[in-house]
Amino acid sequence: MPSCHHFDHLKPVPSASASYAKGCPECIAMGDTWVHLRECLICGHVGCCDSSKNKHATKHFHTSKHPVMRSVEPGEDWGWCYVDEVMADMD
């Protein structure tokens, strides 16, 4: 089973909870839609998931190199490491 150290020592990120209610800021700016939202666990950036056509969360990883994000969808408590391609329980 793959391992990942990127989740080991995360610090709280700036609250982006206001962004959750509004949606993906980049999609909103483009006048576009999204499917689900993801939050970067390094800086708090909120972007749309890979099921969304714009994939802003993954684009954020490619530009920032911030390795981990989490789902901010109600009832979901998982994270993802882009570097190691590992899912983590965020309970």
Image (cartoon, rainbow, N blue to C red):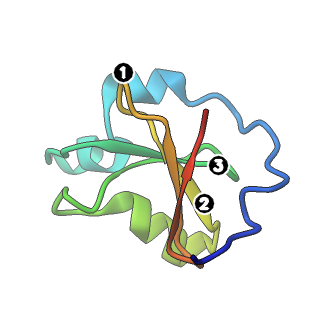
Of the 4 image quadrants, the one containing the C terminus is top right
Q: Mark 1 points at which residue?
A: 21
Disc 3 versus disc 2: distance between alpha carbons? 6 Å
Residue drawn 49% across the image and 44% down it? 78
Q: Tag 2: residue type?
A: Val
Whichever of callouts 1 and 3 sits on the residue coming sooner in the sequence is 1
Classify mark 1: helix, strand or loop: helix
Q: Is residue 16 left or right of residue 6?
A: left
Indicate which disc residue 68 carries.
2
Q: Could you say which is closer to the camera, residue 24 or residue 89? A: 89
Label 3 Cα neighbours within 10 Å, binned few <14 / some 14-19 / many ≥20 = many
Label 2 Cα neighbours within 10 Å, binned few <14 / some 14-19 / many ≥20 = many
Classify mark 3: helix, strand or loop: loop
Does the residue at mark 3 contact the one at mark 2 (Cβ under 8 Å)? yes
Whichever of callouts 2 and 1 sits on the residue coming sooner in the sequence is 1
Disc 2 versus disc 1: distance between alpha carbons? 21 Å
Q: Tag 3: residue type?
A: Leu
Indicate which disc residue 66 carries.
none
Establish if 57 lies above or below 71. below
Q: Tag 1: residue type?
A: Ala
